Image (cartoon, rainbow, N blue to C red):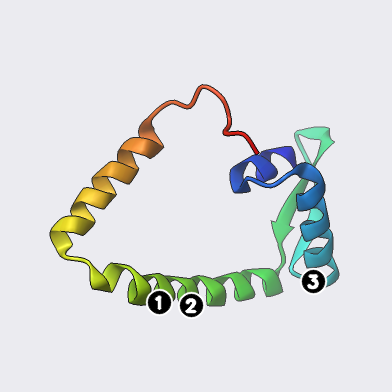
Amino acid sequence: MRDLGDAVVISKSGLTGVVDRMGTAGLVERVPDPGDRRVTLVALTALGAERYEAARVDHRAAVAERFLDRLDPADLDAIERSLGALMDAPCAEPPPR
């Protein structure tokens, strides 16, 4: 949960609540890590994967409509280079919450 929480910038307790609700809805399941019995992994169920794919398609369409389609291709190239540089830069510590 800590690793997942860090990736989505949410507290462990907040993420636990989200995962609990997603589990109740049948979207995810907790599974033991075969390599470390102290660790529990969160995995999408078949229903969760189906819902994720539908949301991903809708999300990409909304981003394109509201953002990408309104910019000149040269501007998109500049944004891509800039965001790539941010992603590649080392981060000394996580940002404050």
Of 74 and 46, nearer the camera is 74
Distance from disc 3 to disc 1, alpha carbons, whole Å, reads 26 Å
Q: How far apart are marks 1 and 2 (CA)?
A: 5 Å
Q: Please tell me in which quadrant of the rendered image residue 35 appears.
A: top right
**Left/right of residue 19 with respect to residue 56 in the rendered view:** right
Q: Amino acid type of disc 1?
A: Ala
Q: Position of residue 7 (x, y in %)?
A: 60, 44
Q: Which of 19 and 95 is in front in this view?
A: 95
User: Callout 1 environment at 10 Å: few (<14), some (14 to 19), or many (20+)?
Assistant: some
Which is nearer the N-term, disc 2 or disc 3? 3
Residue at image location 48% in from the left, 77% down from the top: 58
Q: Which amino acid does label 3 sit on?
A: Gly
- What residue did someone put label 3 on? 26
Q: State left or right for residue 88 relative to residue 55.
A: left
Q: Mark 2 points at which residue?
A: 58
Q: What residue do we see at 82% from left, 65% from top?
A: 21
For label 3, the SS is: loop
